Image: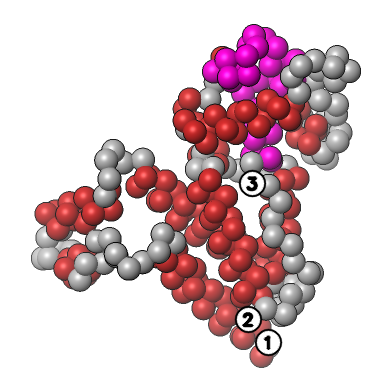
């Protein structure tokens, strides 16, 4: 099926929106689309996106690779199904919550948790969401700002700003976790100490000397993330106050 501009939509999107039937329907096979997607998500969680292939997935499910193609057209469609399913349902909010900041904080923290559980998502997300699963998260984020005086365009801008912050923080966390051995953040701090020339990078050298890049023994795993999020939302609060006065 095509969208309103005449472009052919991926079969997976048509299935997710109920505009097409899943492949293999009516055959009552041992496999199902849901089982295939769940296995693909588990494989990507455990071994990373690079390990995901139709052959590996078939091996995990104990079937022939061609059996998978009765349900999914190929790897691209499979990844669309994965992006839709893996995040799960977003937190629920009224259309105009009284506490916009608490609601948006909860949304951001839960999205950060999604990326922590499924780090491969940040590798796959390279275009605006079009599937119902991801759009449900966007809907939830917009609802957190429903009680503010911000216009709709500004609300979208705020949600995109928070989304990019969450995604960037998750991507950094994922890359640090992928470093061989333990103490990747400590190793980075040592590396900066050796490389950063105070004459060339005085501000950065000051931060290195202050131990900003060294591990904080008393900090929780997401303390830095929450601190950055609070700074970001402080700015959103200023925009809301300005809109209320205008």
Mark drawn on residue 240: 2
Q: Is residue 154 visible?
A: no
Residue 145 visible in the current orientation: yes
Q: Are the residues at dot 1 and dot 2 in contact (C-beta closer than 8 Å)?
A: yes
Looking at the picture, the colour scheme in use is secondary structure
Viewport quadrant of the C terminus: bottom right
Q: Is residue 158 above or below residue 26?
A: below
The answer to whether residue 188 is left or right of residue 246 is: left
User: Which of the image's four quarters has the N terminus?
Assistant: top right
Mark 3 touching mark 2, by CB under 8 A? no
Residue 65, given in percent of the width and then of the height, sits at 63, 11
Tell which circle, 3 or 2, labels the residue nearer the N-terminal end: 3
Q: Which residue is mark 3?
A: 87
Q: Is residue 170 above or below residue 94?
A: above
From mark 3 to mark 1, how far is it between C-alphas?
34 Å
The residue drawn where x is 73% and y is 42% is 131
Q: Is residue 220 magenta?
A: no
């Amino acid at each position: 099926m095509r969208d309103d501009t005449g472009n052919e939509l991926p079969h997976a999107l048509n299935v997710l929106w109920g505009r097409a039937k899943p492949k293999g329907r009516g055959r009552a096979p041992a496999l199902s689309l849901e089982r295939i997607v769940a296995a693909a998500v588990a494989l990507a969680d455990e071994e990373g996106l690079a390990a995901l292939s139709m052959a590996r997935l078939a091996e995990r499910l104990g079937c022939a690779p061609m059996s998978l193609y009765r349900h999914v057209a190929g790897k691209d469609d499979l990844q669309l199904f994965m992006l839709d399913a893996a995040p799960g349902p977003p937190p629920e909010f009224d259309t105009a919550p009284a506490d916009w900041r608490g609601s948006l904080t909860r949304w951001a923290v839960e999205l950060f948790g999604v990326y922590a559980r499924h780090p491969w998502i940040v590798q796959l997300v390279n275009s605006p969401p079009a599937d119902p699963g991801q759009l449900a998260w966007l809907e939830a984020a917009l609802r957190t700002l429903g009680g503010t005086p911000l216009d709709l365009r500004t609300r979208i801008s705020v949600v995109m700003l928070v989304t990019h912050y969450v995604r960037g923080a998750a991507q950094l966390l994922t890359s640090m976790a992928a470093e061989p051995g333990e103490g990747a953040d400590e190793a980075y701090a040592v590396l900066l100490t050796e490389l950063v020339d105070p004459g060339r990078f005085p501000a950065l050298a000051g931060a290195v000397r202050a131990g900003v890049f060294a591990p904080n023994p008393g900090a929780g795993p997401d303390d830095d993330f929450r601190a950055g999020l609070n700074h970001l939302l402080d700015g959103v609060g200023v925009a809301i106050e300005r809109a209320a006065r205008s």
